[in-house]
Image (cartoon, rainbow, N blue to C red):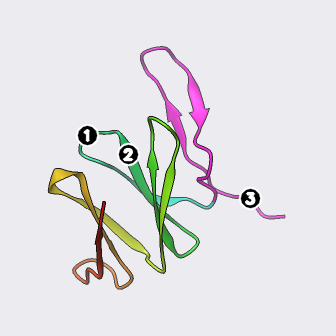
Amino acid sequence: GGRSTRLWIHSFVDGTTRELAGTDDAQSPDWSFDSRRLAFTARRSVKVIDLDNGGITSIPNTSYVEWATGNQILASSGGPGRWSIGLM
């Protein structure tokens, strides 16, 4: 089979590195303003992983993500400036 892209987190404090489960085929990762969540695109969905508990929220049929003030997330199926969903 083909290779899958996954996201990893590295701590510069203690030197540990860990793979983030559920991030297969991840692209375009983007940190929330408070650094507690990470949004990315994968398999025609925007996904948001909570770094505290590993929970993942998926927004299907979207391909672009951007964080807004207040740690709100905007997801779109049409690219920048064509917001179709405001969530979280």
Magenta residues span 1-24
Disc 3 residue crowd, few under 14, some 14–19, many 20+, Cα 10 Å: few
Residue beneath label 2, please? Answer: 37
Identify whether 13 is placed above or below 72. Answer: above
Amino acid type for the residue under numbered disc 2: Arg
On residue 44, the disc is none
Q: Are marks 2 and 1 in contact (CB under 8 Å)?
A: yes
Disc 1 residue crowd, few under 14, some 14–19, many 20+, Cα 10 Å: few
Residue that appears at 29% across and 82% down: 84
Looking at the picture, how far across and down is residue 37, in whole percent?
38, 45
Q: In the figure, is residue 60 to the left or right of 18?
A: left
Residue beneath label 1, please? Answer: 34
Residue that appears at 43% across and 21% down: 12
Q: Residue furthest top?
A: 14
Q: In the figure, is residue 12 to the left or right of 24?
A: left
Query: Which element is circle 1 on?
Result: loop
Residue beneath label 3, please? Answer: 3
Identify whether 40 is placed above or below 33. Answer: below
Mark 2–mark 1 distance (CA, rounded to whole Å): 8 Å
Amino acid type for the residue under numbered disc 1: Asp
Q: Is residue 26 magenta?
A: no
Q: In the figure, is residue 48 to the left or right of 68?
A: right
Looking at the picture, how far across and down is residue 30, in whole percent?
36, 53
Q: In the figure, is residue 5 to the left or right of 15?
A: right
Identify whether 27 is placed above or below 49. Answer: below
Looking at the picture, how far across and down is residue 25, in whole percent?
61, 61
Of callouts 3 and 1, which one flags the residue occurring earlier in the amino acid sequence? 3
Identify whether 1 is placed above or below 9. Answer: below
Query: Which element is circle 2 on?
Result: strand
